[in-house]
Amino acid sequence: MNILMLSSTFPYPPTRGGTQVRTFNFLKYLSQSHAITLVTQQEANVTDTDIDELRNWVDNLVIFERPLQSETKSGILTKIQRFKSFLQDGVPPSVLNRYSSKMQEWIDSFVQAGKCDVITCEHSVNEIYVKPHFQKQVRTLVNVHSSIYGTCRNQLEAGISENFFRDKVSLPLLRRYEQKYCSKFSAIVVTTQEEKIQLQQFNPNKEITVIPNGVDLESFPYRSSDPGGHRLIFIGALDNLANIDAVCFFCNEVLPKIQRRYPDTTFDIVGSRPVPQVLALQEKPGVTVTADVPSIVEYLHKATVCVVPMRTGFGIKNKTLEAMAAGVPVVASDRGLEGLTAEQANVSLTALRANHPAEYINAISYLFTHKKLREELSRNARQLVETEFTWDIAGKRYEQVCLGKQN
């Protein structure tokens, strides 16, 4: 089968963020049995080595430049014009910012020539390149990654929206946009049951399949021993609004109270592209921010507990699965555990749930002082990932959707 994969985000190396990880691992699995043409865009941090490495995983790699800065400038008048365009045309600025007319021409020509059997949009931001009439020629699939309508609604509800008025006005427009673009596709893939329920409200007759994220077990080996101590960790992209909110909330509302009980408690924040707001957290006692490390798993293995204090953000969290795979006990919010059965009846306990400061303090304190519970969570979580959340499992299900086979 000839598969055309569209990803305006360059999916290599698969350590830069959730979009790259999910896109690359699906690409990697599909390339074992199918011919892959990947159309992507080159970002400033993409090196020639990255390009050469990615070529090894596809039959045909087609790269376009990200739209010029002059096309994506961010002055106040430009922003107003884009919002007016959103009101009129229904396409969010975040989608238009990545739109390349040259890339569109190439895709149109490729499809018209009958060179593919399936088109996959890796992340909904790429839906703009799929014309409604493509459905008549090929199977079309959108791998949503995370609902932009659901994310906006969740941020408004959590009170962490960057621009409350803008997002309040945008919310019904995003709902209309998501409903419209989903209608173009033969099939829709989401990461959690919650997202499926939401999108089914918009498109009750559409084929929607839940395929969670996975973990590369070789990259996240199970740790050999429990280090003990009072060392906390958070991992994730540190320019992501949901992650910024999570670490700021934890440092301001939770960590000081834990340190009153356990004065030597440290908090390692490890991830890519930390913004000034995150870097400033290092001024707090015990907090360290470490950016762009070659191997996150080394930091995970040294931690006593991994915290995932997300208050917003749709979809299953890679950071949660990776900590579980590495054998680090997890304390996480409802958002951090979305898509997982962590503590249901007749299910082995794999994580502790917390949503409010007192709940985090109690859960973390209990884990600090109960080694057997840490070992239980570590063992059960690793087993859960091995049996349900590997990229081979996810990739096989994705292949079935591409083939048009119902799961």
Image: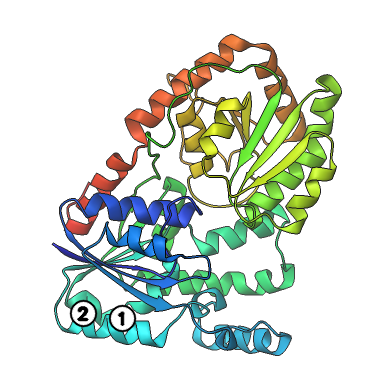
Categorize mark 1 by other alpha carbons within 10 Å: few (<14), some (14-19), many (20+): some
Q: Position of residue 298 (x, y in %)?
A: 54, 32
Asked which secondary structure carries label 1, the reply is loop
Query: Front-most of 50 and 237?
Result: 50
Labels 1 & 2 near each other (Cβ < 8 A): yes
Asked which secondary structure carries label 2, the reply is helix
Residue at 72% x, 85% y: name it.
76
In the rendered image, which quarter contains the N terminus? bottom left
- Residue under numbered circle 1: 131
Q: Position of residue 172 (x, y in %)?
A: 57, 72
Instruction: Give the mark nearest the N terminus, 1 or 2.
Output: 2
Q: Position of residue 192 (x, y in %)?
A: 43, 47
Residue 228 found in image quarter: top right
- Name the kind of residue labelled 2 in the image: Val
Q: Is residue 374 above or below residue 162?
A: above
Task: Residue 297: tell me if it is visible.
Answer: yes
Query: Front-most of 395 and 154?
Result: 395
- Name the kind of residue labelled 1 in the image: Lys
Task: Residue 205: tell me if it is visible.
Answer: no
Is 302 on the left-hand or right-hand side of 401? right
Q: Position of residue 229 (x, y in %)?
A: 69, 18
- Residue under numbered circle 2: 111
Residue 38 found in image quarter: bottom left
Residue at 47% x, 74% y: name it.
177
Residue at 21% x, 80% y: name it.
110
Work out which residue is located at the far front of the displayed protein and give it. Answer: 49
Residue 207 found in image quarter: bottom left
Viewer-nearest of discs 1 and 2: 2
Is 337 on the left-hand or right-hand side of 185? right
